[in-house]
Image (cartoon, grey):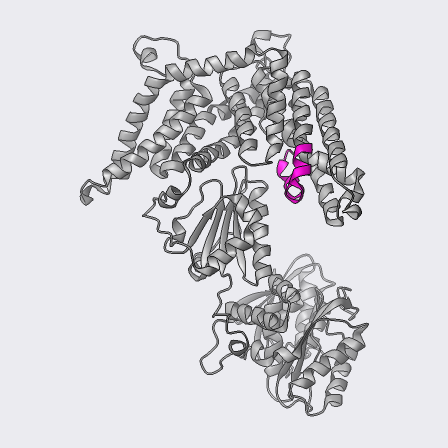
Amino acid sequence: MVSAVTKVCNPMGMHMRPAQLFIKTVTPFKSNITLVVNGKEINGKSIMNLMAACIKQGTELEIKCDGPDEDAMLKAVVELIDSGLGE
Amino acid sequence: MRIVDLLSPDRIALGAQAADKASAIELLVSLQEKGGALTDREAYKEAILAREAQTSTAIEAGIAVPHAKSPSVARPSLAAMTLKEGVDYQAMDGQPSDLFFMIAAPMDGDVHLEILSHLMVLLMDPEFTSQLRAAADPQTFLAVIDRFERAKFGEPEEDTPPLIHASTPEEPSAPKYRVLAVTACPTGIAHTYMAAEALEKAGQKLGIPVKAETNGSGGAKNILTSEEIAQADGIIVAADKNVETARFSGKKVLFVPVSDGIHKAEQLIQTIESGNVPVYEAEGPVSAEPEQEESLGRQVYKHLMNGVSHMLPFVIGGGILIALAFLLDDASINPANFGMNTPLAAFFKTIGGVAFGFMLPILGGYIAYSIADRPGLAVGFVGGSLAAAGTSFATISSGATPVPAGFLGALLAGFVGGYFMLWLRRACDKLPNSLEGIKPILLYPLIGVLFIGAFMCLVNPIMGMLNTGLTSFLNSLGGTSRVLLGAVLGAMMSIDMGGPFNKAAYVTGTGAIATAAAAGAAANDIAYQMMASVMIGGMVPPLAIALATTFFKRKFTDDQRKAGFVNYIMGLCFITEGAIPFAAADPLRIIPACAIGSGIAGALSMVFQCALPAPHGGLFVFPVVTNALGYIAALAIGSVVGMVLIGLLKKDLSSR
């Protein structure tokens, strides 16, 4: 398992469009992805989970990827979040 | 922020019709407009469409959440809609969408994200969405949201009284489940689950959330938490065996047979909601009180079934292994030692024998346990063991040959031991409180075991004689009597499909094989033949119905035909209960047809001298049946007769 910590920087947070983009980004990977948000673990491949977590601008995220392509997945996800989730 | 505060009945449309995505959006925008939160309807709609143009807001599972954060929105507002038939909303999972929440959010602040997040927490629960889709009117729809919001986010704060109180005053500050239920039947395969389903469905229909715990053969599922118990209005215990009830102490509890859970589900829930139910008080670990209201016959039946259901796994495991031993052995090596000649056979036979050895103690033990709770267990166990061994004063003092008292002896031990312990516990109530602690660890076990020991030594010779007499009577039965016996046993299995007749026949069969196995009877013993008739009698009803739904399609509804197919599997697995929905729908035609089919199968099984050493398993134990071909023929003939009778008795649907 590999993990990284980052912050959501886009002003709107994880609303639906960023969440859809996030899911599109992680779906091709085989590994599992778990996000730790405010002490709660959520499944990073479920769009409803992502939106339910109410991730606002400045929220700290721990991203854990576990599986055969965990390194590539983690890299892609961190890049996505740091680039402002497409916004 | 609560969803119920952002929504109102006039912004909810249920079962609407829309041809495509565009018309669904138009409907939703019109709903949204009614709340007065929009300053410019067209600008808002454009913002919605612009958002959809980027990516669809359909999430998954038929849910879509179109939304716009726009200057045309004066304050946050929601509109909701369900569609009779879903439209293609370009969802990622390709499914049509039929449940919509449309969000209108003003430009400033995080409220949009909060509404979205809040909605998602609710929508993730499939129970929530299915209740929303089932809601009959906007009030119910709002009530569902209110209930789940309270359950997931806690009670609303004082300063924001939810709108819902005004519109539906009859909804109290509802806990998640207002009525709880526990269902259990002796076999734990079918009735348990049917009752649970019936209760939950009835709850849905009445708009009263119901959670049912199933105490089936695989252990308890969907277990009630203490929090749920604390919040519930009352609990329905629909069980034909004892279930754990001490946890319900102080709650309103309704005790009914499991069949009431299936047939009178709505009535039961309404009774609980009427509040006209006595409060259940468990006295410490004792749970004898409510049973006093039941008839003696029902009590005895329940205790007996508690014993039988605990004994069955031993009989099934042991019986099949012993049967395998005979199947794998070569009798020509040493006929007197059949079943133990080859190492593999001996292995199976030894393990099977050990499992069988537990049968009678378990039977006695769990009957007594059902009667007197924990203090009864040891007493019943010891009594059952003594019955199996046939110990008497004569065998102890003068070395007389013990005659096992068998199944009947173990039954007696269970009941006598159980009721003795019940009496002993009442008698001990008079003792000073300082002795309370030593009752369960000294007085009950010592006095109880001593009593049952003496009692069994006394009655074992009599029970042994009865047992031997019964066995030799059965063995002496001539051809005709045997066939008649088979017919009666078979027919009893399908007269009430899981009820007392069925269980009486079943217990007779299992009791017979338990006794025969303990006595080391031959593989084609009359006891095993009885069991064969019993099982085949129970397999015929579902099969006859399945065949009838295949060959007489016009006599059944679409749903019944689909359920009929499952009955092939149920029948082959010896789950008679599969036939119940059909029998319940049309008892006067289905039951006689099935009973005759079962009776014929049972009789034919005797004619062909089929013998079955295992008490359950259906098709899977056919390999260990003596004369399996005859058995299959008997099953086929019985099922076809049943099917033809159903065909003759039942009229075509259209001609009704």
Q: Which quadrant of the view contains residue B320?
A: top right
Image: magenta residue range = B574-593
Viewer-closest of B407 and B289: B289
Q: In the shown orientation, is residue B401 left or right of residue B323?
A: left
The stretch drawn in magenta includes residue B112: no
Q: Position of residue A64 (x, y in %)?
A: 60, 64
Viewer-closest of A56 and B262: B262
Q: Position of residue B429 (x, y in %)?
A: 23, 41
Q: Position of residue A45 (x, y in %)?
A: 67, 64
Q: Is residue B153 above or below residue B296?
A: below
Q: Position of residue B537 (x, y in %)?
A: 64, 28
Viewer-closest of A34 and B340: B340
Q: In the shown orientation, is residue B543 left or right of residue B424?
A: right
The stretch drawn in magenta includes residue B590: yes
Q: In the shown orientation, is residue B656 left or right of residue B275?
A: right
Q: Residue at x 71, y 23 (%)?
A: B634
Q: Residue at x 47, y 70 (%)?
A: B173
Q: Is residue B436 above or below residue B33?
A: above
Q: Which quadrant of the view contains residue B37?
A: bottom right
How many dots with numbers? Answer: 0
In this orientation, does residue A39 appear? no
Q: Quadrant of the N terminus of chain B?
A: bottom right
In this orientation, does residue B510 appear? yes
Report the predominant secondary structure element of the magenta stretch. Answer: helix
Q: Residue at x 39, y 29 (%)?
A: B414
